């Protein structure tokens, strides 16, 4: 049985540790957060990730997974040491804060008394593998110890992290030391995933390029959405029509409030920063970031268009987490939107199925009324904004929702609802990238100008699914 140590027991570290234990390895997960480790020792996962807690408990019961705050205990005898600590942006800057990595690697080095392979799972700027090697070389107590470094970027998505880890599209391994790469590849062999074996720098770059591409796809469709809105096309159907093209694909073509979360924002920023530092002008990356920020502002302008001055208006926010199936609030669009609304003098009420607690931590200084459910959140509100695409929002009793509101303005930031149906139910519906905000019939420019309810309710929005694939 291989002995593995995971340094940093967050989303990536815990999923990696639990899954590697599931694959039959002996895993010790380490963290400097005492409370987190205390909770994990009792079998409780301190964040929301579907399927993770039962997996963790099963591996603990099988004796393959344990938790500690002691480097001495975690590093002892481990052949493989994964580093999965945060690599956030430096506060107020675009560069990456490498202090967590430096500190973690330093601590590992001090406790090593045997040769091992150190695997960088954290997303690190291109060239960081060399930095890690240099720290190890300087701080290992015995100069003859061999510690090989492998870059193994992680591509899991929060919300489906366990499945993503166990069924990856590919495993990327980068190192100058082939024997180390082959040993790490053995760990992943049961997953039968395509292996990309390359050098350190290229592996590090693959991670940034992948995240930047996905972020660009999101900003691209959001720009198309804006054009659709003024020209009278429906971005959802545009995405369907585009997505059938295998060269394009349908994934990441949902127009909405843009990307958020712990990775896309900081990674695009970091890549642009690396490029600029190297004397390049990363124009596309800059546009991707600017479009994403604008997309969040769109909510406020749509509300202002409907309600005028937002001072003293009561606005309900449905969904706080940066996406569904997680309680992660890092760089969640809801934070910017709520802050802007409150700054404009509005009163914010909010509901999220799981992210109340993390939202309070993320916005301790903002007056938000946290509600027990959607209906409670919209009670007597002037408008409601759907910010996160939680499944339960699709199944809402919309008549009841409408009945609870003072003014029936609904900004659908994730295009969850059918505009015609919403209009029929009496909502003033504003989608993203739908003609006139999705509120009026739009088969021609003339129709777009029709503002009477009767015409709107007589019209039926064709469901995108009715578009059949070209033969
Ligand atoms: P996280 O904040 O959830 O977890 C990091 C953990 O590291 C925390 O529990 C923290 O207490 C611990 N830590 C910090 N310094 C430490 C130290 N010196 N020693 C031991 N533990 C320490 O972060 P995360 O979301 O798991 O991200 C980790 C890395 O993985 C980042 O580089 C991120 O960019 C990358 N990544 C994240 C995701 C994701 O979806 N979250 C996906 C792919 C890659």
Image (spheres, grey):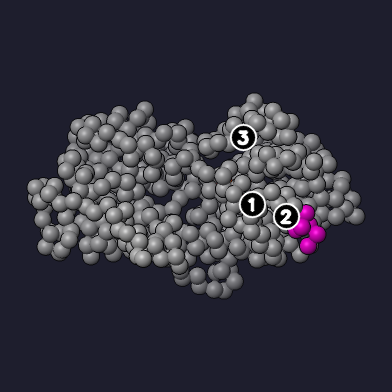
Label 2: state its secondary structure: helix
The magenta segment: 178-185
The image quadrant of residue 204 is: bottom right
For the residue pair 471 and 305, the one nearer the viewer reads as 471
Nearer-N-terminus badge (1/3): 3
Residue 316 pos. (x, y %):
30, 37
Q: Vertically, is 356 above or below 239?
A: above
Residue position marked by numbered label 2 in the rendering: 185
Picture residue at 34% right of the left edge, 38% below the top:
393
| Disc 1 to disc 3, C-alpha distance | 22 Å
Q: Disc 1 designates what residue?
A: 122
Q: Residue furthest front?
A: 471
Confirm or reject: label 2 Cβ below 8 Å from ligand 1: no
Q: Nearer the viewer, residue 405 or 165?
A: 165
Q: From this viewpoint, is residue 298 visible?
A: no
Q: Earlier in the sequence, mark 1 or mark 2?
A: 1
Q: Quadrant of ligand 1?
A: top right
Name the spot of residue 91 as percent of width and height, x first.
Answer: 54, 51
Q: Nearer the viewer, mark 1 or mark 2?
A: 2
- Quadrant for the N terminus, please: top right
Q: Nearer the viewer, mark 1 or mark 3?
A: 3
Asked if the residues shown at circle 3 and circle 2 are in contact, with their CB atoms under 8 angstroms apart, the answer is no
Q: Identify whether 209 is placed above or below 66.
A: below
Residue located at (45% from left, 34% from top):
354
Tell me the residue at 56%/69% (across/down). 275
User: Which residue in the protein does label 3 denote?
Assistant: 55
Q: Is residue 183 visible?
A: yes
């Amino acid at each position: 049985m291989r002995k593995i140590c995971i340094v940093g027991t967050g989303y990536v570290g815990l999923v990696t540790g639990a899954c590697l234990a599931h694959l039959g390895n002996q895993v010790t997960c380490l963290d400097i957060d005492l409370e987190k480790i205390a909770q994990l020792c009792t079998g409780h996962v301190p964040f929301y990730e579907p399927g993770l807690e039962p997996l963790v408990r099963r591996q603990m019961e099988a004796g393959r997974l344990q938790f500690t705050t002691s480097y001495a205990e975690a590093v002892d005898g481990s052949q493989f040491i994964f580093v999965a600590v945060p690599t956030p942006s430096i506060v107020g800057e675009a560069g990456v804060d490498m202090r967590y990595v430096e500190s973690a690697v330093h601590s590992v080095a001090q406790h090593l008394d045997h040769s091992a392979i150190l695997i960088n799972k954290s997303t690190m700027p291109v060239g960081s593998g060399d930095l890690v090697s240099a720290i190890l070389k300087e701080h290992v107590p015995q100069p003859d110890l061999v510690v090989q470094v492998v870059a193994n970027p992680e591509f899991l998505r929060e919300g489906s992290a366990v499945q993503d880890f166990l069924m990856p599209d590919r495993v990327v391994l980068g190192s100058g030391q082939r024997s180390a790469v082959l040993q790490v590849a053995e760990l992943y062999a049961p997953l039968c995933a395509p292996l990309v074996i390359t050098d350190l720098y290229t592996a590090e770059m693959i991670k940034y390029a992948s995240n930047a591409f996905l972020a660009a796809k999101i900003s691209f469709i959001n720009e198309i959405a804006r054009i659709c809105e003024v020209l009278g096309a429906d971005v959802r159907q545009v995405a369907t029509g585009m997505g059938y093209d295998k060269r394009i694909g349908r994934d990441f073509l949902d127009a909405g409030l843009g990307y958020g979360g712990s990775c896309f924002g900081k990674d695009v920023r970091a890549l642009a920063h690396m490029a600029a530092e190297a004397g390049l002008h990363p124009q596309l990356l800059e546009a991707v970031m600017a479009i994403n920020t604008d997309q969040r502002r769109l909510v406020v302008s749509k509300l202002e268009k409907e309600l005028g001055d937002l001072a003293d208006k009561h606005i309900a926010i449905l969904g706080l987490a940066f996406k569904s199936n997680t309680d992660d609030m890092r760089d969640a669009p809801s934070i910017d939107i709520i802050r802007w609304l409150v700054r404009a003098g509005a009163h914010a009420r909010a509901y999220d199925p799981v992210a109340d607690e993390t939202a309070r931590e993320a916005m301790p200084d903002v007056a938000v009324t946290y509600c027990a459910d959607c209906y409670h959140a919209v009670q007597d509100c002037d408008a409601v904004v759907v910010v996160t695409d939680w499944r339960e929002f699709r199944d809402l009793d919309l008549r009841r929702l409408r009945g609870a509101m003072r003014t029936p303005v609904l900004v659908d930031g994730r295009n969850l609802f059918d505009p015609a149906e919403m209009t029929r139910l009496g909502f003033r519906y504003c989608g993203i990238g739908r003609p006139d905000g999705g509120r009026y019939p739009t088969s021609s420019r003339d129709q777009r100008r029709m503002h009477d309810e009767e015409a709107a309710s007589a019209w039926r929005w064709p469901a995108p699914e009715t578009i059949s694939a070209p033969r």
